[in-house]
C-alpha cells in the first residue's frame, strides 16, 4: 500500500515538474527511489518490523531486534 502511494506521488511529481521544465529533477528522484528499494534493512523495533513486512519488504530485512516476533517467518532472521 505504501509502495503504491510512493509511486502515485512520484507520478504526480513527474507530471508537475514536467509541465514546469524540471524533467531532470524527476529522473534524479526516480534513481534515488530505485536505490532505496535495493537496500537491506535491519529493523530495531517489533512494530517497525511488522510495518515493513506489511509493506512487502520482508525479503530486504536482514536482521531484527529481539522484540520482532511477528510474523513467525521473521524469527529466522539474525537478531541484533
Image (cartoon, rainbow, N blue to C red):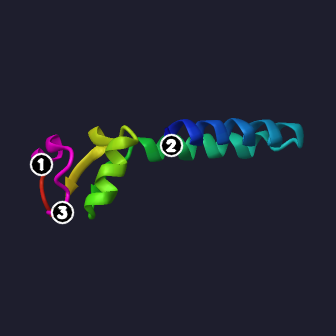
What's the distance in space between the residues labelled 1 and 3, CA to CA?
A: 10 Å
Left or right, 80 with respect to 48, comes to left
Q: Nearer the viewer, residue 41 or 53?
A: 53
Q: Residues within 10 Å of mark 1 (few under 14, many from 20)?
A: some
**Residue at left 15%, top 40%?**
73
* Residue occupying the point 55% across, 47% down: 32
Sort mark 2 into few (<14), some (14-19) or many (20+) by Cα contacts within 10 Å: few
> In the figure, is residue 52 to the left or right of 20?
left
Which of the two residues, 66 or 18, is positioned nearer the viewer here?
66
Which label belongs to residue 75? 1
Classify 10 Å Cα crowding around label 3: few (below 14), some (14-19), many (20 and above). Answer: few
Is the Cβ of the residue at disc 2 closer than 8 Å to that at disc 1? no
User: Could you say which disc has been placed on residue 67 in the image?
Assistant: 3
Classify 80 as above or below 34.
below
Look at the numbered disc 2 and give the secondary structure of its residue: helix
Quarter the C terminus occupies? bottom left
The residue at which mark 2 appears reads as 2
Q: Which residues are magenta?
A: 65-76
Q: CA distance from mark 2 to mark 1?
A: 24 Å
Residue 36, which numbered label? Answer: none
Relative to the observer, which residue lies in front, 21 or 19?
19
The question of residue 26 being in magenta is answered with no
Q: Position of residue 33 (x, y in %)?
A: 54, 44
Q: In the image, what residue occupies the spot 29% across and 41% down? A: 58
Q: Is residue 75 magenta?
A: yes
Q: Hey, which quadrant is residue 7 in on the image?
A: top right
Residue 54 position, x and y percent, is: 36, 42
> Which badge, 2 or 1, comes first in the chain's sequence?
2
Q: Secondary structure at mark 1?
A: helix
Amino acid at each position: 500500500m505504501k509502495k503504491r502511494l510512493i509511486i502515485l506521488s512520484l507520478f504526480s511529481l513527474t507530471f508537475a515538474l514536467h509541465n514546469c521544465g524540471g524533467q531532470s529533477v524527476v529522473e534524479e528522484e526516480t534513481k534515488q527511489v530505485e536505490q532505496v528499494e535495493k537496500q537491506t534493512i535491519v529493523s530495531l523495533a517489533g512494530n517497525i518490523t511488522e510495518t515493513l513486512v506489511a509493506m512487502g519488504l520482508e525479503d530486504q530485512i536482514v536482521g531484527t531486534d529481539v522484540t520482532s516476533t511477528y510474523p513467525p517467518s521473521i524469527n529466522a532472521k539474525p537478531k541484533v
